[in-house]
Image (spheres, helix red, strand yellow):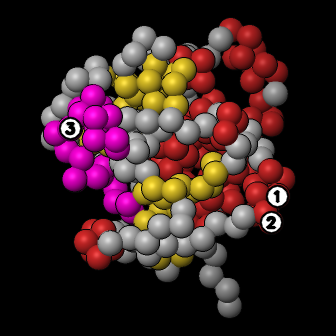
Amino acid sequence: MSTAPKLMTLGQMKDLISAVTQAFPTDLSFDQATALLSEKKKLGDRIRTILSDESVVVKDNVTRTLTWQQAIQKAYALMGMEAEYAEFCKEQGVKEIPGRWVIPMVKGLSCSKIIISLQKSGSGFWSYYDDLDKKVTHNDRDPNRDGSYICSFLAVMEADEENKGKSANQLKEEKHQGITLMERLLLGLIYFLMTGKHLDIKKITLCAGSRYDFGYVPSVDWGSDTCGVGVCCCRPSNCYDGLRSRSAVSLPAEPSESEAEQAIA
């Protein structure tokens, strides 16, 4: 005799509703809100799809997670770039390096596409500026300017310990190759899809490879007060222990023993 699955409690339902409400963007325009309301059924279907996603379903007290490669594929699917990613994989492929996170930056990517996918995935998002693709005018690497590429970062939740206390100006003098804003947003999306967790909960990633049009440096962290991935900015001279760049390495690259020891299992 089969046993019916145990249904969620009223408390769990309230918590889920609260989570959806907190993730809902508060800066929608009147026209965007009107469009969503005119397609309420489709909106409901999308929410149901996210809530029933197997990557966050718990069975026998074990949370199912995606592999890094599966999370990358899902991220590009969320952005509507399955074909571009598939073509990139045919041409180059995406290698795995122990102790490092390898991410493909495929031509056609944009901050806005990643942000929409962060919101779709339930990760949430907030920023002081609406259009980061236009506001962040300098990037050391850009797939749309330079063509698709692959880079890797030390596989740690909090930004690189070795870069603590160093401002963007200091890092530039050291010829440091720092993470760009687009790379950090994609890295966070992939990590969230893989684990259901967030990067930079205690520290802040200084996106030393990017600059706003007014010369400041983007920074990214997880805001518990806003329940979303947050993008802020700081002066190029700002430095303190909690503000750290992530070192970008182009492939092929082999991690050092110390890096492998710091890597997340």
Q: How far apart are marks 3 and 2 (CA)?
A: 39 Å
Nearer to us in this view, 231 or 135: 135
User: Which quadrant does the C terminus fall into?
Assistant: bottom left
Nearer to us in this view, 176 or 188: 176
User: Which secondary structure, mark 1?
Assistant: helix
Is 173 in the magenta?
yes
Hey, what amino acid is under mark 3?
Lys
User: Is the C-beta separation of discs 1 and 3 under 8 Å?
Assistant: no
x%, y% of residue 231?
42, 29
Q: Distance between the residues labelled 2 and 1?
A: 5 Å
Q: Which residue is drawn at 19% across and 44% down?
A: 164
Residue 221 figure quarter: top left
Hey, what amino acid is under mark 2?
Lys
Q: Is residue 91 left or right of residue 53?
A: right
Kindly identify which residue carries mark 1: 87
Judge whether residue 163 can be spotted in this image: yes
Nearer to us in this view, 1 or 246: 246
Residue 5 figure quarter: bottom right
User: Disc number at residue 90?
Assistant: 2
Q: Which of marks 3 and 2 is nearer the N terminus?
A: 2
Q: Residue at x 67, y 86 (%)?
A: 2
Hey, what amino acid is under mark 1?
Glu
Q: How crowded is mark 1: few (under 14 residues within 10 Å), some or many (20 or more)?
A: few
User: Which secondary structure, mark 3?
Assistant: loop
User: Which secondary structure, mark 2?
Assistant: helix
Nearer to us in this view, 61 or 114: 114
Task: Point out the stretch of residues depicted in magenta.
Answer: 154-176
User: Disc number at residue 166?
Assistant: 3
Q: Residue at x 39, y 62 (%)?
A: 155
